[in-house]
Amino acid sequence: MADIAPDLKTPSDLPRNDTRTVAEALNSALADCYALYLKTKNFHWHVSGPHFRDYHLLLDDQAAQILGVTDAIAERVRKTGNVTLRSIGDISRRQTITDNDRDFVPAGDMLSELRDDNLKLVESFRAVKDAAEAAKDNATSGIVDEWTDQAEERAWFLFEASRKG
């Protein structure tokens, strides 16, 4: 992580090196959130088939929930005295969730891919939890539990929606 401009050094009682480790984990999760948000919206816009309305609404709800988490993550980074993502390029360099630029994706494949991506996001959140606990950053450790639960719920809904029969 780059040095922090003096004007952006938010006071914190946590050691700077510890908060940088937590901020790195948070920024990685934030990049994944943005990648997952855009993929979910892409699939929302391009879903097709007999379950169009159900999937279209499900994906829109999930995208809104993912976008809602992004601000909380970025603000948590700032509260610890660190800086967060600044551009699409920054997101691209940090994201672990892969983009999907295919011209057509069958609806079932969309749901499966998003399910797996949400579970990958859970892994990112667990890395945040580990870093926060190691840094004794109780606030981050506590708040990441809700984000994890939301991602697990999205994965569950996507799994159930994609079941056959």
Image (tube, rainbow, N blue to C red):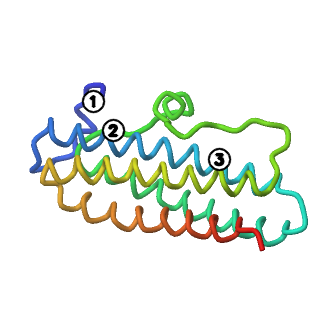
Can you say whether 46 is above or below 15 in the image?
below
Tell me whether the residue at label 2 lies in contact with that at label 1, contact meaning CB atoms closer than 8 angstroms: yes
Q: Nearer the viewer, residue 21 or 48?
A: 48
Kindly identify which residue carries mark 2.
83
Q: Secondary structure at mark 3?
A: helix
Q: Nearer the viewer, residue 7 or 41?
A: 41
Kindly identify which residue carries mark 1.
5
Label 3 or label 2, whichever lies nearer to me, is 3
Q: Nearer the viewer, residue 101 or 7?
A: 101
From the viewer's perspective, tell me whether residue 109 is left or right of residue 76: right
| Distance between the alpha carbons at the discs numbered 2 and 1 | 9 Å
Q: Earlier in the sequence, mark 3 or mark 2?
A: 3
Q: What's under tag 3, amino acid-wise? A: Leu
| Distance between the alpha carbons at the discs numbered 1 and 3 | 30 Å
Q: Which mark is residue 62?
A: none
Residue at left 32%, top 53%?
76
Quadrant containing the N terminus is top left
